[in-house]
């Protein structure tokens, strides 16, 4: 689900395909079907088993396809309009040839700047793995800027958060970093997916499993506390 600001507020998944394939596969493996083979002759059983094996393989392929599609975080409508994967350096160096085209990029937020009527997110680009999840920082090939109309909270879109963005190319620019100048790509946001910040996820319980610094000695009538100091 994508809100009016182009921010993906719900993971877009084709779960129906994977679920259907899984249920069909489970049905084929169920005892109901296999018990029906008891009354067949040897040749018929062999033919039936070979047919079912082919059917199993097809279902496994269908399940794998469903998993790959379901893992994509950018909505299918926008993804269908996006350009095929292009080397990021090519996008930067030949940005004029891609102006107006939709590209899907991923990376790590470096800075989020709020302006009068828009928000600009500077991103360290990295290649994406299966599921459109950005890879590690060491694989970066440059930077890009994301222009979003309206306000995005910099406390949420904070430094080092991982994002996947679909946007229209609007050009390129350059900036100084130390004594060097680098070129970067500029895109206008169509959809942003902000990946969960797993490192900041709270623990389900603030204490370890063992009741440190003491343990309980179970007794049918009472409990002893053994303290370790």
Image: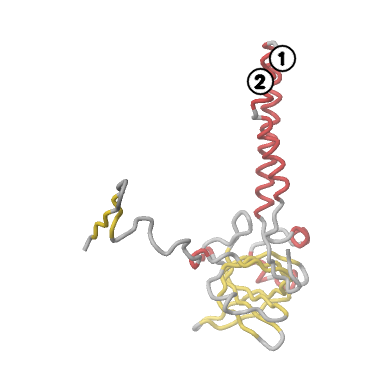
Q: Residue 39's quadrant in the figure?
A: top right
Residues under numbered marks 1 and 2 in contact, where contact means CB atoms less than 8 Å apart:
no
Corner quadrant of residue 206: bottom left
Residues under labels 1 and 2: Cα distance? 14 Å
Closest to the observer, 223 or 108: 223
- Find residue 44 and name its label: 1
Quarter of the figure with the C terminus? bottom left
Q: Secondary structure at mark 1?
A: helix
Q: Which of label 1 and label 2 is nearer to you?
A: 2
Vertical comparison of 80 with 67: above or below: below
Relative placement, left or right, of 213 versus 142 is left
Q: Quadrant of the N terminus?
A: bottom right
- Tell me residue 86's x, y (percent): 67, 61
Crowd rating for badge 1 (residues with CA inside 10 Å; few <14, some 14–19, many 20+): few
Would you call the spot at circle 2 few (<14 residues within 10 Å), some (14-19), or many (20 or more)? Answer: few
Which residue occupies 23% across, 60% down? 228
Look at the picture and state if 171 lies above or below 52. Answer: below
Percent position of residue 125, x then y: 59, 68
Mark 2 = which residue?
35
């Amino acid at each position: 689900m994508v809100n009016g600001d182009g921010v993906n507020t719900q993971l877009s998944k084709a779960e129906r395909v994977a679920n259907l394939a899984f249920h069909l596969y489970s049905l084929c493996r169920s005892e109901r079907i296999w018990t029906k083979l008891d009354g067949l002759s040897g040749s018929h059983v062999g033919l039936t088993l070979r047919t079912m094996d082919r059917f199993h393989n097809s279902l496994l392929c269908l399940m794998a396809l469903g998993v790959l599609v379901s893992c994509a975080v950018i909505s299918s409508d926008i993804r269908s309009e996006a350009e095929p994967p292009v080397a990021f350096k090519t996008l930067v160096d030949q940005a004029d040839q891609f102006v107006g085209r939709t590209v899907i990029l991923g990376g790590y937020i470096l800075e989020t700047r709020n302006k009068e009527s828009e928000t600009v997110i500077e991103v360290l680009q990295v290649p994406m793995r299966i599921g459109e999840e950005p890879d590690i920082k060491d694989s970066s090939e440059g930077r890009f800027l994301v222009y979003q109309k309206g306000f995005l909270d910099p406390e949420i879109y904070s430094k080092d958060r991982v994002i996947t963005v679909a946007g229209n190319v609007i050009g390129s620019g350059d900036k100084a970093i130390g004594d060097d100048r680098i070129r970067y790509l500029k895109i206008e946001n169509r959809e942003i997916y902000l990946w969960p910040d797993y490192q900041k996820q709270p623990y389900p319980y603030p204490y370890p499993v063992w009741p440190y610094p003491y343990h309980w000695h179970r007794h049918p009538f009472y409990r002893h506390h053994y303290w370790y100091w």
